[in-house]
Image: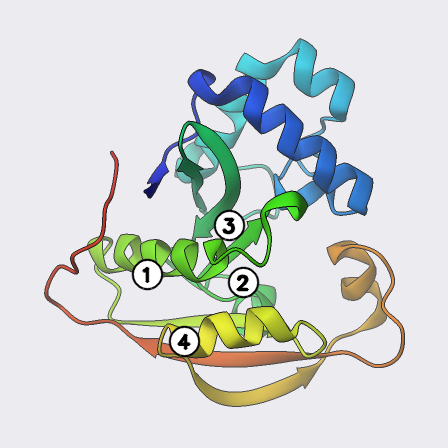
Amino acid sequence: MCLLVRPCEMYRESFLSGAAEFFAEGRPDSTYAEFLGYDLISLERHFSDFMRDLLNLDADTSLPQGWQRDRVFWLIGQGEYLGQTSVRPQLSSRYLITYGGHIGYSIRPSRRRQGYGTRILALALEEARQLGLKRVLVTCNSDNHPSKKIIEHNGGRFESSMVMPAHLLRAEGPAPKGKIDKLRYWIELPQEPQTLDRAP
């Protein structure tokens, strides 16, 4: 059984293990660590501060300059950190409107291809519905075939693809091979609660 929780100290060791996997992969901001100014050493030494900064992304008055309001959840299964999702109530920047979308998610490398991607997006969609959203934009890179399947499995309808500028590709992680487009999907949200396990 997997559920979403807000980031908390209870999962410190498991999160740090997952963060190390993302850093080794060259994608430290799958946890928002690098953006918030943390590396693996400072994450371990100042974990409480990192929790505060992560939760503050949902507070309009505490956002770093240039960042948009972002409600972060962790996917937890059997007491283990499995991945992270972000739900953005508004597409209030050009980047989000074009490339980022309402929801982002990532599964730690050692737990991929086990169905957790489909699960985390389904739970994130329910959180988006709870926030009052009726329709959400979810995107993925054109070379990310597993994510494409996850989005389509959760009801995503393809709208268009946008060429990703090189500087944005570099910001998202390791340099890809060849041209990459951002695939844009819209998902309609039912207005009745879904039967999914959630956590406050």
Q: Which residue is mark 1?
A: 125
Q: Amino acid at mark 1?
A: Leu
Viewer-proximal residue, 85 or 119? Answer: 119
Circle 4 residues within 10 Å: few <14, some 14–19, many ≥20: few
**Residue 89, position in %: x, y?**
36, 56
- Residue shown at 60% from the left, 80% from the top: 183
Lower sequence index among marks 2 and 1: 2
Lower sequence index among marks 3 and 2: 3
Viewer-proximal residue, 64 or 179? Answer: 179
- Tag 3 near tag 2, CB within 8 Å: yes
- Tag 3 near tag 4, CB within 8 Å: no
Lower sequence index among marks 4 and 1: 1
Lower sequence index among marks 1 and 3: 3
- Give me the disc on residue 93: 2
Question: Label 3 to label 2, Cα distance in Å?
Answer: 7 Å
Q: Amino acid at mark 4?
A: His
- Tag 4 near tag 2, CB within 8 Å: no
- Give me the disc on residue 68: 3
Lower sequence index among marks 3 and 4: 3
Circle 2 residues within 10 Å: few <14, some 14–19, many ≥20: some
Secondary element under disc 4, as helix, strand or loop, is helix
Query: In the rendered view, does 27 fall on the left or right side of 177?
Result: left
Q: Amino acid at mark 2?
A: Ser
Query: In the rendered view, does 57 fall on the left or right side of 143?
Result: left
Lower sequence index among marks 4 and 2: 2
